[in-house]
Image (cartoon, rainbow, N blue to C red):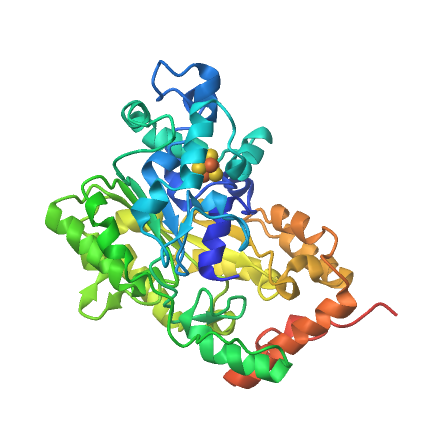
Amino acid sequence: MSRDKDLHDILSGKVIGTKEANDWKKQTSLEREKRERSKISQNQKYSSFPKQYNKDKARSLCMAPWTHLHAWPNGKVFQCCSAQQDPDDEYLGNLHKESLENIWNGKMMRSIRKDMMKGIRSPHCKKCWDDEDTGNQSLRMMLNHRFGHHGPELISKTKESGRVKDMTLRYWDFRFSNVCNFKCRSCGPELSSGWAKDHTKRNELLGYPIDVKDLTKPDRLAMLWEQIEPSFPYVEEIYFAGGESLMMEEHYRILERLIKMGKTEVRLNYNTNFSKLQFKSKDVIELWKHFPEVHIGASFDDYGKRAELIRSGTVWSEIEDNVKRLKKELPDIWKRFFVSCTVSIQNVYNLPEFHKHLLDTGMISYHLNFFCNILHGPDWLNIKNLPDWMKDEIEEKLLSYEKFDFSGVVNFMREQPTGDLYEITPRFISNMDTLDTIRHERWRHIMPELRHIAKRPE
Ligand code: SF4
């Protein structure tokens, strides 16, 4: 699971952590501050919609199909990130085959709008309905809360067929490319261009099939820029993720364009590895100084050498320097800065030390600036697949830590393994050893607590 996937899971609600973080599960980074200021009540779910829509109809509406699109580096476009739960999920269209405008009024998008206007729960929105039916907040609720005031105008202009003439995208989530300077052990070439070489070598060493596709060229949505240009006057909020969002040319072009337009009230949300604050001649801190609403979620899973092994490409001292710089030059943004920690077999044992280190070094100041995002795949890194004797040790350690409530992590870890440990654990060892060979690293040395992972009860 890549950093990008991590945040995708946060967006999708697979977030487990403190009591507060549990309250936040099913929410996006861009929802968090909003929630603190204003909890969305049941009535508010539809309060911004036009009066002519009765309560039942308004209950099925969501502003996403009228204000938003979500594109992946491989060209697939979804109505939102909640719609994309699995790689094989149905998508609205592919930018390599059709234009954004076509997709905006394509068959699937029209059908979603039509269902919503008729008061029908769209089958393409299962995730949101599951969330709401189980008492959790959904992305739909957040988007309605944020953009519902546009509902009257946008819905009244919608044809019975579901067609909306103007594509006025107010909330953008475009993953322009998979360019990334990191190659996290849990990730792969689909979401990190840095992984390509290691992926081929790993597959050779492990005897896995070698990809036919040329992975050395990053996936890039070169055609997207022209297509989003007409939406600049409408944009209110942007979510940047990757790849690595701060290494994307398009990210800087967007910020500069907004500054030039004097449109700096746009809210900027980030998922980033926070390793590079400069890109070519650009300095993101200088650019952020123009924007009062910047929200940064940093993918840090551990500190020091452990961080450098888990997310290859990390230089931990540079990460610390970058956070210090943010804190010094943009203290208001730093106050909202949060660490999104992907919990896997690699770091679960060390979570208390990591959290304490963040507090002790002043990288974060408040427990709400940290939350845990549990890794589900690959299975060989999933904490459910630890042996029981290790789970016992970890549980004791995590639950005795007082500065953060890791009970959600423990509960997840205590669930049944996802498969046969006699098969999964050797795969953990072979994958970790193979990456060590390729990268000249030594996981047993850096993570001594995992050395005996294959030990079985007598
Ligand atoms: S209801 Fe949920 S899944 Fe459907 S479009 Fe809205 S946010 Fe996306």
Q: Quadrant of residue 62?
A: top left
Looking at the image, residue 109 sits to the left or right of residue 332; the answer is right
Residue in the picture at 43% in, 43% down: 28
Q: Quadrant of residue 152?
A: top left
Q: Position of residue 293 (x, y in %)?
A: 26, 44
Q: Is residue 308 visible?
A: yes
Looking at the image, residue 145 sits to the left or right of residue 248; the answer is right
Q: Is residue 335 visible?
A: no
In this rendering, is residue 417 above or below 369?
Answer: below
Query: Which of the two residues, 328 or 232, is positioned nearer the viewer here?
Result: 232
Query: Which of the two residues, 55 or 113, is positioned nearer the viewer here?
Result: 113
Q: Report how many numbered discs are placed on residues in the image.
A: 0
Which residue of the protein is positioned furthest toward the right in this rendering? 458
Q: Position of residue 58 (x, y in %)?
A: 43, 21
Query: Which of the two residues, 407 or 189, is positioned nearer the viewer here?
Result: 189
Q: Position of residue 223 (x, y in %)?
A: 28, 59
Looking at the image, residue 27 sits to the left or right of residue 86; the answer is left
Q: Quadrant of residue 246?
A: bottom left
In this rendering, is residue 139 above or below 86?
Answer: above
Looking at the image, residue 34 sits to the left or right of residue 444; the answer is left
In this rendering, is residue 449 above or below 382?
Answer: below
